Image (cartoon, rainbow, N blue to C red):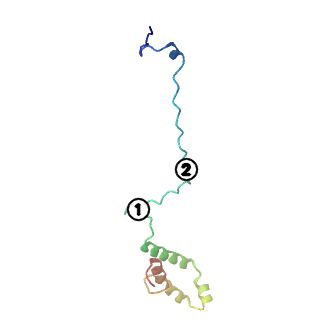
Amino acid sequence: MKRESSPASPSPDALTTPPPLPTPTPTPKKAKTTPKKAATPKKAGGATNAWTPDKRELFIDRIIATGYKSANLDALAAELDLTKRQLIDQLVPNRSNLRSKAAKMARGDSA
């Protein structure tokens, strides 16, 4: 008659060899990404980073203001056969001139 071993008492073989370890599943490799630049901090008013017509207009207006302040208007006027006053009149803000037309074009309005 065969004797059944009880589950509570392990066989002598089980005491000498440890149970096999489960095989680890390989983890998928992550795709390489380029490091992202730090985002421009948002203003308290909830500003977004999208270009709007108002932002384009302000950008062009500021570029024109900065550029003409550092330009040699005397030399440019002589080259164009105009007076310095004529050049300045085209660059003054809030007038119907080249500056306002450039700002309107940047905004998307018809000039």
Secondary structure under badge 1? loop
Residue at the image position 60 percent from the left and 89 percent from the top: 80
| Disc 2 target residue | 31
Task: Reply above or below: 52 against 103.
Answer: above
Secondary structure under badge 2? loop
Q: Is residue 33 left or right of residue 108?
A: right
Residue at the image position 41 percent from the left and 62 percent from the top: 43
Q: Real-space Cα distance between discs 1 and 2? A: 33 Å
Q: Quadrant of the N terminus?
A: top left
Front-lying residue, 72 or 48: 48
Q: Indicate the position of residue 89 as horizontal and vertical percent values.
A: 49, 87
Can I make out residue 92 in this image?
A: no
Report how many numbered discs are placed on residues in the image. Answer: 2
| Disc 1 target residue | 43
Residue at the image position 45 percent from the left and 74 percent from the top: 58
Front-lying residue, 99 or 53: 53
Task: Reply above or below: 80 against 31.
Answer: below
Task: Reply above or below: 84 against 47.
Answer: below
Q: Is residue 84 left or right of residue 2?
A: right
